[in-house]
Image (cartoon, rainbow, N blue to C red):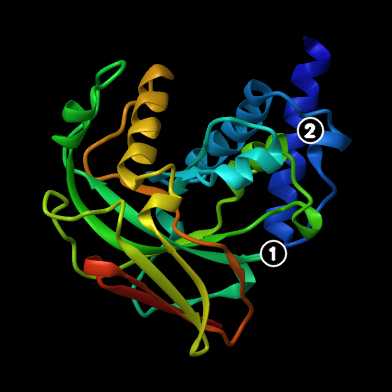
Amino acid sequence: MPHQSKAIQQAAQALAFARANRRSIPPVSTSHGIASLDVAYAVAELNTRARLESGCRVVGLKVGLTSKAVQQQLGVDQPDFGVLFDDMEFLNGQDIPTNRLLQPKVEAEIAFVVGRDVNCSAPSYSEFLTCLSYALPAIEIVDSAITDWKITLGDTVADNASSGLFVLGDQPVTIGALSLGAIGMQMDKNGQTVSTGSGAACLGHPLRAALWLARTMAARGQGLRQGQVILSGALGPMVPVAAGDLVHASVGALGSVSCRFI
């Protein structure tokens, strides 16, 4: 156990250094033996605490690995989650500084806004729905500290689910009248369509992905809080971006969201 604890601390330090200096590193699953889910989350938790101590605030959470194809690729049967901090949030049309990123890629998603705390240890679907206020179109900018995205499950979980930044659309929409499972998505980069998909690509339905997150966090004693954002997972393939790229995502009745990388 002492050896494992030391490996967890060293892996957390290596990932934090990589992000602070924008220098990717080899997979921590290999270099530090970070393989199991519990150990990987312990690594991520150390860096979460460090960010909180530096003055950052948690403003939400993201669900990752919502695609069945990606789950099969990494040999898992469930999603993972990462923490969203206040300095990661951008709004529709804002410029995204690439000097904060290492190997950015973009995904179009549906974001949910929590309207009241989710405190149940295992909230039912109906209990969870009553805690959501709005949905928004979103662009998640995923980013990995692991060189060339050569990640295992342990690597992405330890690296805060490969979180980078995120962009929220302007107009919140109530979710009751929306068919989120059937909603379509088209994402363009520099005027060319680069990704398409639908709500069904996200664990079959974006609300199911969000429910998984609510139950997972409640079981960990960290229920969702009023005002937090949930990024529910990609609606289509992720696409690499670089400085100069303009990204525009249309998500059915939710409208659109865009950003430019500088």
Q: Looking at the image, is 210 positioned above or below residue 24?
A: above
Callout 1: SS: loop
Could you tell me which residue is drawn at 23 percent across and 55 percent down?
Answer: 135
Q: Looking at the image, is 196 positioned above or below residue 142?
A: below
Could you tell me which residue is drawn at 60 percent across and 66 percent down?
Answer: 105
Identify the mark at residue 102; answer none if there is no mark: 1
Callout 2: SS: helix
Disc 1: CA contacts within 10 A as few (<14), some (14-19) or many (>=20)? many
Q: Nearer the viewer, residue 250 or 60?
A: 250
Q: Nearer the viewer, residue 255 or 203?
A: 203
Disc 2: CA contacts within 10 A as few (<14), some (14-19) or many (>=20)? some
Q: Position of residue 49 (x, y in %)?
A: 53, 34
Q: Quadrant of residue 174?
A: bottom left
Amino acid, disc 1: Leu
- Looking at marks 1 and 2 on the same chain, the residue that comes earlier in the sequence is marked by 2
The residue to which callout 2 is attached is 10
Q: Is residue 12 left or right of residue 187?
A: right
Q: Looking at the image, is 177 positioned above or below residue 167?
A: above
Identify the mark at residue 57; answer none if there is no mark: none
Could you tell me which residue is drawn at 23 percent across and 22 percent down?
Answer: 124
Q: Looking at the image, is 52 positioned above or below residue 33?
A: below
